[in-house]
Image: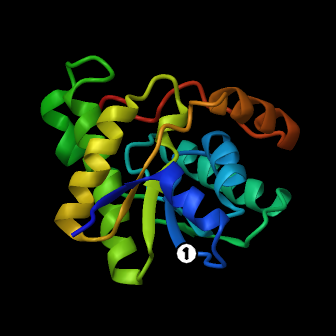
Amino acid sequence: MVVSRPLEDAIAELEVSAKTPKLLLHCCCAPCASHVLERLSPFFRITALFFNPNIKPREEYDKRAAELLKLLSLAGYVNTVDAIVCEYDPASYDAVAAPFWDEPEGGRRCMKCFELRLGETAMRAASLGYDYFTTTLSVSPHKDAELLNKTGADMAERFGGVYLVSDFKKRDGYKRSVELSKQYGLYRQNYCGCQKM
């Protein structure tokens, strides 16, 4: 059973085929999503999934969700991009992160957060019939793409679906996200989202 596939391999195949598979794209925020959607929209029918229970406070969550919807309304993509904005549920994040609050960013708290968000994405991708799923998180220079990709593949194996292995910060992805954020007037937050309970 295939649980993961390199993104570039999938794109190379799609460039010579008439297929446009469905992709469920976990989006952490509009700035990160901007580059990823630009990169992927020629090849996939995308649904942007905003599932980020790590973001606090509620006002920040709502602001980031609104910015993602703003991006989708302003940017012209090759294929239509839909969105699912999940209900605010910080308790699900607190339950997995609480034992690790004293660890620095990049430690086990982040690993549990990745598992939570990519697990939800994998479950939805499998139950809703998406061909692939992946995340925008690897655009950030503060996020470990290798850990994200391992987590995505693990969640695909556990819940179903095929995870697209990627590192969107490569090929000047982060730089492009900054450019697109300026172009569309997007709010760029100065923290990942988590705050002590």
105 up-or-down from 137: above or below? above
**Residue 156 location, quadrant:** bottom left
In the rendered image, the residue lying farthest to the left is 99
Q: What residue is shown at x 24% (from left), y 32% (from top)?
A: 109
In the picture of the structure, the residue carrying the numbered disc 1 is 21
In this rendered view, identify the residue nearer to me: 17 or 172: 17
Q: Amino acid at mark 1?
A: Pro
Residue 86: tell me if it is visible.
yes
44 up-or-down from 142: above or below? below
Tell me: 157 left or right of 79.
left
Colour setting:
rainbow
In this rendered view, identify the residue nearer to me: 121 or 57: 121
Q: Position of residue 34 (x, y in %)?
A: 70, 46
183 up-or-down from 71: above or below? above
- Badge 1 marks a residue whose secondary structure is loop
Residue 87: tell me if it is visible.
no
Tell me: 189 left or right of 112.
right
The C terminus, quarter of image = top left
Q: Position of residue 11 (x, y in %)?
A: 58, 58
Q: What residue is shown at x 82% (from left), y 56% (from top)?
A: 75
Tell me: 49 left or right of 2.
right
Q: Position of residue 103 (x, y in %)?
A: 21, 19
The N terminus, quarter of image = bottom left
In the rendered image, the residue lying farthest to the front is 16
**Residue 45 location, quadrant:** bottom right
The count of marks equals: 1
Q: What residue is shown at x 19% (from left), y 30% (from top)?
A: 108
